[in-house]
Structures are given as structure tokens and as C-alpha cells.
Amino acid sequence: MTEYAGPLPTPTIDTAPFWEHCRKHELRMQKCLDCGHVRYPASVICPKCYSENSEWASMSGKGTIYSWVVFHQAYGAFFAGIVPYAVAIVELAEGPRMLTNIIACPLDEIDIGMPVEVAFEDITAEFALPKFRPLGKP
Ligand SMILES: [Zn+2]
């Protein structure tokens, strides 16, 4: 693995479990044990029923593109080496929407509603980023 020079996640006490699961290539999110609401990003209480009871439930890793853009402008030296790249909001099958990147797909083929699946990118020994690729493609 070449040395990663991009920005790194900054886990908090609430988000550290999310990143630890990502490191193991598991997409997990907090699921309320009282009403079943799946929430992202992580928080102390459920925004639907205010319960503090939750578990880190496994997500299917599948969803659809809700919205997307292609960045051509490089905001920093790291990004100058990767433009153009796609930033998207992916709506998971379980409901939450994630800000992420679309990979392994020609930029002109990305579209709203496209089925995608999570593909973890190991960036350091501590972190793997949950990105998304077209469903069923390697
Ligand atoms: Zn709840």
C-alpha cells in the first residue's frame, strides 16, 4: 500500500465504532433497539423516539445513487492527483444516506437511481473508506 496523503477520518466517541467496523470491511450503523430506526451519522440518541438504546447493525452494503457531482477542481495537492472524481449521496437499502465516492465506473455512466454496493478502500492500517461501485461489478 502506498502512503496515503489524503484527509483522514477523525473519529469521535460516537463515530469510532463505525470506523472500526469499516476497517474490518463491515458497514454497520446504529439501529435503535426501541423503534428500529437506522441512523447515520452516529448519535447518542435516536432522532425518531429519543431512545438511547441501539446496536451496531450490519447493513446490506447496497443502495442507489440519490445525487452526485463530479469534482474537476482540486482543493489541495492530494486532490490534484485524483481529479476528476465523483462525490455522491448514496441511499442505502436500510434508509440512511451517505456522502461517499463512486468508483469503478466511468464518470459519464453515473446516474441517479443507479444500484451500487459498498467497496472498502484501505487507505491506512487504521482506516478503510466506504466507497460505492456499480452493483455486481468487480
Ligand atoms: Zn428509536
Image (cartoon, rainbow, N blue to C red):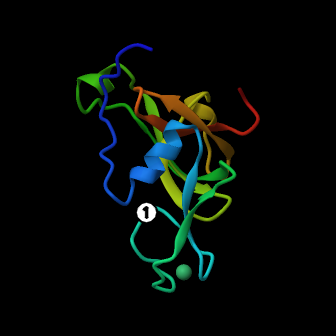
> Eyeballing the image, is 30 above or below 80?
below
Quadrant location, ligand no. 1: bottom right
> Quick one: which residue is furthest to the top in this view?
2
In the rendered picture of this protein, how many numbered marks are placed on residues? Answer: 1
Q: Amino acid at mark 1?
A: Ala
- Where residue 93 appears, as percent x and y from the top left, is 68, 59
Which residue in the protein does label 1 denote? Answer: 42
The quadrant the C terminus occupies is top right
> Eyeballing the image, is 124 above or below 19?
above
Residue at point 31%, 54% (across, down): 12
Residue at point 63%, 76% (across, down): 36
Describe residue 121's horizontal placement relative to residue 36 as left or right: left
- Where residue 81 appears, as percent x and y from the top left, is 34, 19
Q: Secondary structure at mark 1?
A: loop
Establish whether ligand 1 lies closer than 8 Å to the Cβ of label 1. no
> Eyeballing the image, is 99 above or below 38?
above
- Circle 1 Cα neighbour tier, 10 Å, few/some/many (<14 / 14–19 / ≥20): some
> Quick one: which residue is furthest to the right in this view?
136
12 vs 77, nearest the viewer: 12
83 vs 50, nearest the viewer: 50
Residue at point 54%, 59% (across, down): 29
- Where residue 101 appears, as percent x and y from the top left, is 49, 39
> Quick one: which residue is furthest to the left in this view?
76
The quadrant the N terminus occupies is top left
Residue at point 37%, 60% (across, down): 14
- Where residue 137 appears, as percent x and y from the top left, is 73, 30
